[in-house]
Amino acid sequence: MAINDVQVTDLKIIHNPAGDVYHILKAREQSYAGFGEAYFSSIAPGIIKPWKKHNRMTLNLVVIMGCIKFVIYDDREGSVSNGSFQEVILSPDLNYSRITVPPGLWMAFEGLGQIHSFLVNIADLDHDPEEVERVELDDIKYKWS
């Protein structure tokens, strides 16, 4: 099930013999909420990074190498998708897209495939450890493969 307010946006790859161009985010897009910081994160194959919820930050995630399965869980009171999970697998080779995750949703992710995977996040806020919540993987009941 799709979670209310989560957006998955197909992205464009411009192929060029000298090297390809991979679009990520444009300021005119609806999912653009402002700029706070951009960073890369990596994950090893078979590793699952546990649940995290940002209370104010909007995430714009694109996998630039490898393959990552993102799982989003909605426990927002009054949300039409409360209690639902949404799975999105991103890879530049299989599904070159951006996932926009608004504040208030839990997210965990798993490295798929045989290599370290890398994502870029373009967030609307600077990192603030006070605005994020973390729980252990088993605290939210989801069946990982």
Image: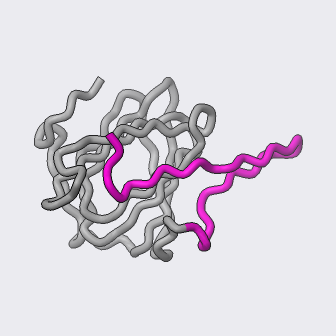
The quadrant holding residue 89 is top left
| Residue name at image x 49 percent, y 64 percent | 122
Give the main secondary structure of the magenta stretch: loop
Q: Where is residue 19 in the image (x, y as percent from the top left)?
A: 81, 45
Q: Where is residue 125 in the image (x, y as percent from the top left)?
A: 40, 74
Scheme of image coloration: one colour
Q: Is residue 13 magenta?
A: yes
Q: Residue furthest right?
A: 17
Front position in the image: 87 or 50: 87
Q: In this view, does 98 lie above or below 112?
A: below
| Residue name at image x 57 percent, y 37 percent | 95
Q: Where is residue 133 in the image (x, y as percent from the top left)?
A: 19, 60
Q: Is residue 39 above or below residue 135?
A: below
Quadrant of the rendering where the C terminus is positioned: top left
Question: In the shown orientation, is residue 75 left or right of residue 10?
Answer: left
| Residue name at image x 45 percent, y 51 percent | 41
The quadrant holding residue 92 is top right
Question: In the shown orientation, is residue 139 left or right of residue 104?
Answer: left
Quadrant of the rendering where the N terminus is positioned: top left
| Residue name at image x 44 percent, y 57 percent | 100
Residues drawn in magenta:
1-29
Front position in the image: 145 or 73: 73
Q: Does the magenta stretch include residue 46?
A: no
Q: Is residue 108 above or below residue 131?
A: above
